[in-house]
Amino acid sequence: MEKPASPTISFFRALRYAIGDAYDRLGLTLASSLLWFIACIPWVAALEMMRARFGLVQLGVVFLTSALLAQVWAGCVYLAYRIATRDEPSLICFVEAWRGMFWKTLALSLIQTFVTLVITFNMILYLMSNVLLLRVFGVVVLYLLLLWFTAMLYQYPLLVEHLFGAYVAEQTRASWLRRVLRRSLLLTIGNLPFSAGMFAIVAVWVLLCFLTLFGLVLLYAGVTALAAVHWTRALLINYGVIQLPPEPEIIPDEEFRIPEE
């Protein structure tokens, strides 16, 4: 991807679109967030179980619950995509997402879980070392983990675009995963200020939602999915992959007046 000469949609403009869509479609935002929170319960339990005792069974449960959580998150992202594109969004989007992306979401979630665990275990191992050089390297691995987390925010919006939107003409069975992973890393590294801002706002949003349990249950996933979709689409528009949606036509008030006899 070549760096755009003059971005069309800014970071904060995309965020404003996401907040506006979340408000306009508040019912869907609340419902999708609640579904995601329910899916989080077995995932958190699996993480607690692995922390108490690490083994193959516990690791397998973590992968299984992560795959379940990813399926619900994919539904949230697809719903956010339909909201962002004004394409008749409804909760049926979850069924359509699972029917159209189940196996691809499963494969992507397994890779995400594996890479996250490998990087995390290596970071902990280096940071707990008695050798100063290894602890310094552990900090470097921490930055790699943050980059990976940021790239993950792009991956499901890119998967949805690949299957339903901008990349639909490019999809092949052999290359879809490489395209999604590669483009998520390119968007992250090639737009570091944009990506850093995205990660920072999502981190602050997570903190606010945790401080208010209501926000975590009914707002977090829906708003985050909308923000991730709008930020991803903003970059794709800036790179010329997606066409900028036309501005709504403003109809003068005179046309609505009843002509005088």
Image (tube, rainbow, N blue to C red):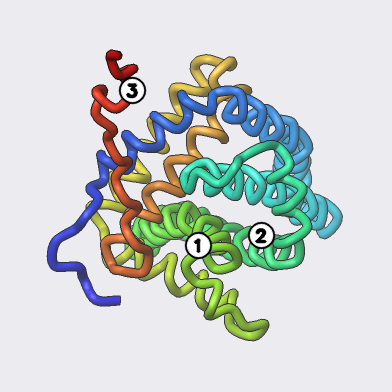
* Mark 3 closeness class: few <14, some 14–19, many ≥20 residues within 10 Å: few
On screen, 1 above or below 132?
below
> Could you tell me the amino acid type at mark 2?
Ser
- The residue singled out by tag 1 in the image is 158
Would you identify the image quadrant in which residue 187 lies? Answer: bottom left
> Nearer the observer, disc 1 or disc 2?
1
- The residue singled out by tag 3 in the image is 256
On-image quarter of the N terminus: bottom left
Circles 3 and 2: CB atoms closer than 8 Å: no
Mark 3–mark 2 Cα distance, whole angstroms, equals 52 Å
Would you identify the image quadrant in which residue 106 lies? Answer: bottom right
For residue 75, say whether it is visible. yes
Q: Residue at x 26, y 61 (%)?
A: 238
Q: Position of residue 47 (x, y in %)?
A: 71, 42
For residue 125, say whether it is visible. no
Q: Secondary structure at mark 3?
A: helix
- The residue singled out by tag 2 in the image is 109
Q: Which residue lies most toward the right here? A: 57
